[in-house]
């Protein structure tokens, strides 16, 4: 455990039990959410490569147009 995390837990130990439980629940939810996000990104990494390859191939054969922003 890092020194900073150890320090955070030491401070948390001084809180009332119900506040400690709320803090713990929030930390667990955050860790689970981060893990789920990482898994989604990993599962779609190949898709982004495919989209890039398709766009470059279309550009190579002249199927794309230069983007021109709308002037207001």
Image (cartoon, rainbow, N blue to C red):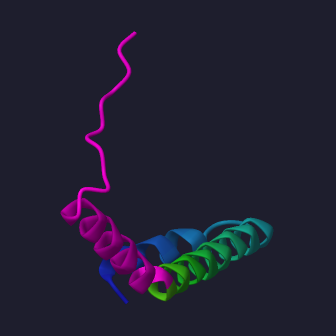
Say which of 59 and 22 sits in front.
59
Picture layout, residue 57 above or below residue 42: above
Left or right of 60, for residue 38: right
> Residues in magenta?
44-72
- Which residue occupies 59% across, 82% down? 36
Q: Please identify the residue farthest to the left as the structure is shown.
A: 60
Left or right of 38, for residue 22: right
Magenta span includes 45:
yes
Left or right of 56, for residue 47: right
Q: Please identify the residue farthest to the right as the structure is shown.
A: 18
Residue 2: x percent and y percent? 33, 84
- Which residue occupies 26% across, 71% down? 57
- Which residue occupies 66% across, 66% down? 15
Say which of 35 and 45 sits in front.
45
Picture layout, residue 36 above or below residue 52: below
**Quadrant for the C terminus in the image:** top left
**Quadrant for the N terminus in the image:** bottom left
Q: Quadrant of residue 66?
A: top left
Q: Please identify the residue farthest to the top as the structure is shown.
A: 72
- Which residue occupies 38% across, 79% down? 50
Residue 69: x percent and y percent? 33, 27
Q: Quadrant of residue 58?
A: bottom left
Residue 41: x percent and y percent? 48, 79
Magenta span includes 43:
no
Q: Quadrant of residue 71?
A: top left
Left or right of 66, for residue 19: right
**Figure label count:** 0
Say which of 71 and 35 sits in front.
71
């Amino acid at each position: 455990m890092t020194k900073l995390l150890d320090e955070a837990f030491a401070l948390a130990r001084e809180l009332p039990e119900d506040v400690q439980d709320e803090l713990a629940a929030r930390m667990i939810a955050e860790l689970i959410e981060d893990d789920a996000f990482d898994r989604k990104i990993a599962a779609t990494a190949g898709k982004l490569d495919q989209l890039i390859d398709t766009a470059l191939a279309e550009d190579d054969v002249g199927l794309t147009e230069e983007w021109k922003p709308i002037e207001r």
